Structures are given as C-alpha cells and as structure tokens.
C-alpha cells in the first residue's frame, strides 16, 4: 500500500518563475491538503481539495493555486515566485470520514534564488 | 483565529530522563489534539493524539494530557532514548478537516 507520494523532491527556481508540485494521496484517501513548512517552523495550511474543489484555504495569496484530479491526485502551483516562498511543501491526505490523522508525503523542497 | 503557542522551542535531556512539551491555544472549537514527530529530513508522523472528551492518553513511553478549561495540552516522554531526538509539533483542528500546527520543539536526547 503506497503512502503519500510527492514530486519533485527538490527543485530550484528563480524569482518570478512559476512552479508546479505534484501529490498522489494514500490509497483510499480522497482529500488532499497542502502545507508550507519554512525552515525551523511548523507546517502552515495552504488549502485543501476534495471532489476536485478547493474546500478550505489558509492565509496564502492568490499566487498559490491548486487542482485535484478525478483520481484524487493534486497539484500545487505557485506563480511569480518570491524568495520567501523557499520552503518544504508538504502534501497530506485523509478521507472525508476523517478520523483525525493526516498522512504526509516526504515533501518537495523548493529553493527560490 | 487560531493561535497555538508551543514551549520550549528547544529541549535537551539526558538519556533516561523525561521530557515535557506544552502547547496552549485560543480556539475553543478544537476537539482534536495530535502530536507529530518530524525527524531530520523526514515527513511529520503522528505519534499520539487525544480528543476533547478525554483528559489523558498513554501509549508506552508517550502520554498526552489535555486541560480544555485552561486550553493547554502537553506531551510527556518518559525514559527518553536517543531515537526520540527530533522536532515535535503539537496541532489542533480548528473545527475543520485540517490541522493548525505549533512552532515545534527540537528535542535532543544526550546519550
């Protein structure tokens, strides 16, 4: 049973560029949440997708957008990258009948130069 | 909005001693309080959780206590081992199917 998988694991971009990160949820899960974890900080909630729609959103600008596909996989897009967007981006999956636990992927480490 | 204060930010203990990490929060809607462990370069993983109808929960060397009236919950690790060294995050669910995390505690267990 595959857990949550994310790609790419590492990437480097320059300011102003755009990036797309990908996530496949754990088998049996239908809800995907994205978190940003800056160095030395706790994960910060970006948004959550269920049934291909954004259900909830944290305090992030519109430069951060996402998508969920019919197979429950998800993408996180960030436009007009800023230096401050450098972070570990974590995907977490759960089911709508949520028992509480979030299953995290290993993350995508984005460096913006 | 949600606010979670986690203390201490760093904690060093001798192997075999106990470690306690405390979180205080302001959102009264939360009814689920998990603790996650994140080893260096790894994903956060759930180690223990507690719901608002329970005051304490234990799992071997790990325990969590919750005081909803005072709005704080704590992680207790007894008989610490070097493999307990990691960053620990408390979290709560602000009335929705997502988690709001604390700022983390870096625990170092000295052999």
Image (cartoon, coloured by chain):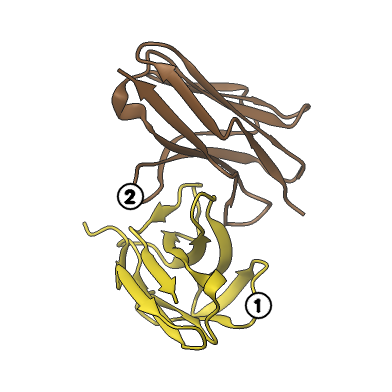
Q: Which quadrant of the figure contains the N terminus of chain A? A: bottom left
The letter of the brown chain is B
- Residue at the spot 50% in from the left edge and 56% down from the top edge: A97
Q: Is residue A65 left or right of residue A24?
A: right
* Marks 2 and 1 on same chain: no
Q: What is the total number of numbered labels drawn onto the structure image?
A: 2
Across and down, in percent, residue A84 comes to 56, 70
- Residue at the spot 47% in from the left edge and 88% down from the top edge: A17
Placement of B106 over or under B45, stated as above or below: above
- Residue beneath disc 1: A61
Across and down, in percent, residue B34 comes to 53, 39
**Cβ–Cβ under 8 Å for marks 2 and 1:** no
When asked about the image quadrant of residue A61, the answer is bottom right
Residue in the foreground of this view, choosing between A61 and A66:
A61
- Residue beneath disc 2: B42
Across and down, in percent, residue A60 comes to 64, 72
Q: Which numbered circle lies on residue A39?
A: none
Q: Chain for mark 2? A: B
Q: Which quadrant of the figure contains the C terminus of chain A? A: bottom left
Residue in the foreground of this view, choosing between A53 and A16:
A16
Residue in the foreground of this view, choosing between B73 and A37:
A37
Task: Decide: few, some or many residues near mark 2? Use Cα within 10 Å; few <14, some 14-19, many ≥20.
Answer: few
Q: Is residue B2 left or right of residue B103?
A: right
Looking at the rendered structure, the secondary structure element under dot 1 is loop
């Amino acid at each position: 049973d595959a857990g949550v998988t994310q790609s790419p694991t590492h990437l480097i971009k320059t300011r102003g560029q755009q990036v797309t990160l990908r996530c496949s949820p754990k088998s049996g899960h239908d809800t995907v949440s994205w978190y940003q974890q800056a160095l030395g900080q706790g994960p910060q909630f970006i948004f959550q997708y269920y049934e291909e729609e954004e259900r909830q959103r944290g305090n992030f600008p519109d430069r951060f957008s996402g998508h969920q596909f019919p197979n429950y996989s998800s993408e996180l897009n960030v436009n007009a990258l800023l230096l401050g967007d450098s972070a570990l981006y974590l995907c977490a999956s759960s089911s709508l009948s949520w028992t509480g636990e979030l299953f995290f992927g290993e993350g995508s480490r984005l460096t913006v130069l | 909005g949600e606010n979670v204060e986690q203390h201490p930010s760093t904690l060093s203990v001798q192997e075999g001693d106990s470690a306690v990490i405390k979180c205080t929060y302001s959102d009264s809607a939360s009814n689920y309080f998990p603790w996650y462990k994140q080893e260096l370069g790894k994903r956060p993983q759930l180690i223990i959780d507690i719901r608002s109808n329970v005051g304490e929960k234990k799992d071997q060397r790990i325990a969590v206590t919750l005081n909803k009236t005072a709005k704080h919950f704590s992680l207790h690790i007894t008989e610490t081992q070097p493999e307990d060294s990691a960053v620990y995050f408390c979290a709560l669910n602000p009335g929705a199917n997502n988690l709001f995390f604390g700022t983390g505690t870096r625990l170092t267990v000295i052999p």
